[in-house]
Amino acid sequence: MQTKNRRCRKFPKIKLIKRQEMWTLTAQGWAIAIASIAYLIFFTITHVHSFLAVTSPIKSAEVLVVEGWLPDYAIQQALTEFKNGSYSLVITTGGSIEKGIYLSEYKNFAEVSAATFKKLGLESEKVVAVPTPVVIKDRSYASAAEFNRWLSDSNLKLQSINVFSLDVHTRRSWLLFKKLLSPNNIKVGAIAAKTQDYDPNKWWDYSQGVRTIIDEGIAYIYARFLNWKS
């Protein structure tokens, strides 16, 4: 009887594979998919620079905010913008200088850029340096936040400003300044200085262009969708 019961016991069957139906692309479908991906890549390559290096100024802006870490040629472009606009004041921002601080009388980029404007002929009373406190991350946000605090403590009653940055960094700076100043009903425009490091129309032909586009593209996505304090 026991032997019979043992025979009746059946071990479960183990199946490692199974047959199932699945949808797949036809030859025409693959051709269209590949063509669409290729077009998307081409469109991104040819338009990403103009997207990041945005120039969308407010014509009636009262103050030009210049990021202090800009190279000298960009400061010259900012001075031209100031003279051609209806601005009454230039505000320079920026954190501590990372090299040469023991040799320079200026300890941060805001002061260096303000002194550069004066050296180029701009009246002292039209330039104000707003240094950024020392931070190890979110430096662009810290500069915008410090400007916002300075503006709150000042007697200025602004309706609009233009942020002057360099090339493809401009989109991210514009985003951060708008986030911080919009609650105060201050309109923010953006102006991108033209870079001399590579040809913007053929940035993919330059190692500096490729590195800059990739770095700023990732940084903007991070600031826009993950953490705008960057």
Image (cartoon, rainbow, N blue to C red):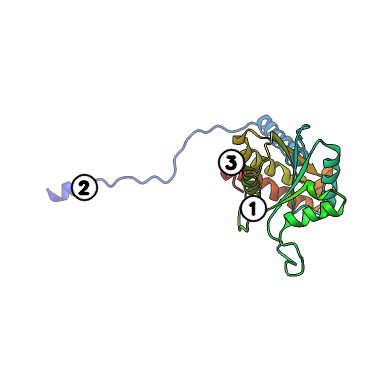
Q: Nearer the viewer, residue 32 or 154?
A: 154
**What's the mark number on residue 225?**
3
- Identify which amino acid the numbered label 2 is placed on: Arg
Task: Mark 2: give few (<14), some (14-19) or many (20+) Cα within 10 Å.
Answer: few
Q: Secondary structure at mark 1?
A: helix
Of tags 1 and 3, the one toward the viewer is 1
Contact? badges 1 and 3 (CB < 8 Å): no
Q: Residue at x 75, y 67 (%)?
A: 100
Q: Is residue 33 above or below residue 136?
A: above
| Residue 184, quarter of picture | top right
Q: CA distance from mark 1 to mark 2?
A: 76 Å
Return the residue at label 1: 139
| Residue 12, quarter of picture | top left
Q: Is residue 49 above or below residue 110?
A: above
Task: Mark 3: give few (<14), some (14-19) or many (20+) Cα within 10 Å.
Answer: few
Q: CA distance from mark 1 to mark 3?
A: 18 Å
Q: Nearer the viewer, residue 210 or 39?
A: 210
Q: Residue at x 63, y 56 (%)?
A: 133
- In this view, the residue farthest toward the right is 121
Give the percent coordinates (x, y) of residue 2.
13, 50
Give the percent coordinates (x, y) of residue 164.
76, 44
Q: Is residue 161 visible?
A: yes
N-term-proximal mark, 2 vs 3: 2
**What's the mark number on residue 7?**
2
Q: Is residue 187 above or below residue 139?
A: above
Q: Residue at x 77, y 32 (%)?
A: 60
